[in-house]
């Protein structure tokens, strides 16, 4: 048994670190959400920010867009040319995806400076890609509403998680101290 623990020490350390970081960040995020009462930023600051930035991008590419609070549910409605096309809910703000990304990077840490920089840069890339994803999804739903299911449940989650996976692979192959976890 002891030889197995020694043999898989790095794997066990990775799993424990990943789960610990993920738990701490997730609990912190849910505490943030529970403290967000929606009085200043509806439904919460990050979801509101993503909705407003999506609105700015939509208007920037030539659509007459508007984002308004949803009257019934905790979300923001995206309206293009007077047509309701999508809603931005808490899950659309990419924070949960960034938490997943950060947990992996920290569990596979390299040098402190490179880990910190990669966490910061990767989070920005994921956040920016998420805004572009919502922009394209909104435009797609405006022009092709009958493709809602495949756009929202297959293509766009695949793209955001694919981006995270590529960032992870770059990290493991270029910056991590533990390039080969099975040694």
Image (spheres, rainbow, N blue to C red):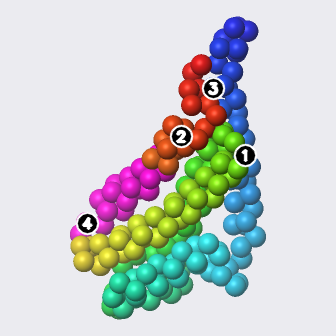
Please give the residue where the numbered disc 3 appears in the rendered image: 11
Of the two numbered discs 3 and 1 on the same chain, state the one appearing first in sequence: 3
Task: From the viewer's side, name the closer residue of 130 and 173.
Answer: 173
Marking on residue 112 = 1
Q: Nearer the viewer, mark 3 or mark 2?
A: 2
Task: Look at 65% across and 76% down and name the residue there.
Answer: 45
Which structural element holds mark 3?
Answer: helix
Tag 1: Cα neighbours inside 10 Å, few (<14), some, or many (≥20)?
Answer: few
Which structural element holds mark 4?
Answer: helix
Tag 3: Cα neighbours inside 10 Å, few (<14), some, or many (≥20)?
Answer: some
Task: From the viewer's side, name the closer residue of 142 and 170.
Answer: 170
- Stretch in magenta: 146-165
Distance from the alpha carbon under mark 4 to that under mark 3: 42 Å
Marking on residue 147 = 4
Of the two numbered discs 1 and 4 on the same chain, state the one appearing first in sequence: 1
Please give the residue where the numbered disc 2 appears in the rendered image: 174
Of the two numbered discs 2 and 1 on the same chain, state the one appearing first in sequence: 1
Quarter of the image where one finds residue 57: bottom left
Tag 4: Cα neighbours inside 10 Å, few (<14), some, or many (≥20)?
Answer: few
Q: Nearer the viewer, mark 4 or mark 3?
A: 3
Q: Quadrant of the N terminus?
A: top right
Q: Nearer the viewer, mark 3 or mark 1?
A: 1
Q: Is residue 106 left or right of residue 70?
A: right
Task: Look at 41% across and 66% down and name the residue there.
Answer: 133
Q: Nearer the viewer, mark 4 or mark 2?
A: 2
């Amino acid at each position: 048994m002891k030889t197995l623990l020694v043999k898989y020490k790095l794997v066990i350390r990775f799993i424990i670190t990943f789960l610990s970081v993920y738990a701490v960040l997730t609990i912190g995020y849910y505490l943030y959400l529970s403290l967000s009462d929606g009085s200043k930023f509806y439904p919460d600051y990050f979801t509101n920010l993503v909705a407003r930035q999506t609105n700015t991008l939509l208007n920037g590419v030539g659509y007459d867009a508007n984002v308004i609070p949803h009257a019934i549910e905790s979300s923001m409605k995206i309206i293009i040319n007077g047509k309701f096309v999508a809603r931005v809910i808490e899950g659309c703000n990419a924070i949960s995806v960034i938490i997943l990304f950060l947990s992996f990077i920290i569990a596979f840490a390299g040098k402190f400076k490179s880990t910190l920089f990669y966490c910061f840069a990767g989070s920005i890339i994921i956040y920016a890609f998420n805004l572009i994803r919502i922009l394209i999804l909104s435009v797609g739903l405006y022009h092709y509403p009958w493709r809602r299911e495949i756009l929202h449940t297959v293509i766009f989650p695949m793209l955001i998680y694919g981006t995270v996976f590529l960032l992870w692979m770059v990290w493991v192959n270029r910056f991590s101290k533990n390039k080969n976890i099975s040694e």
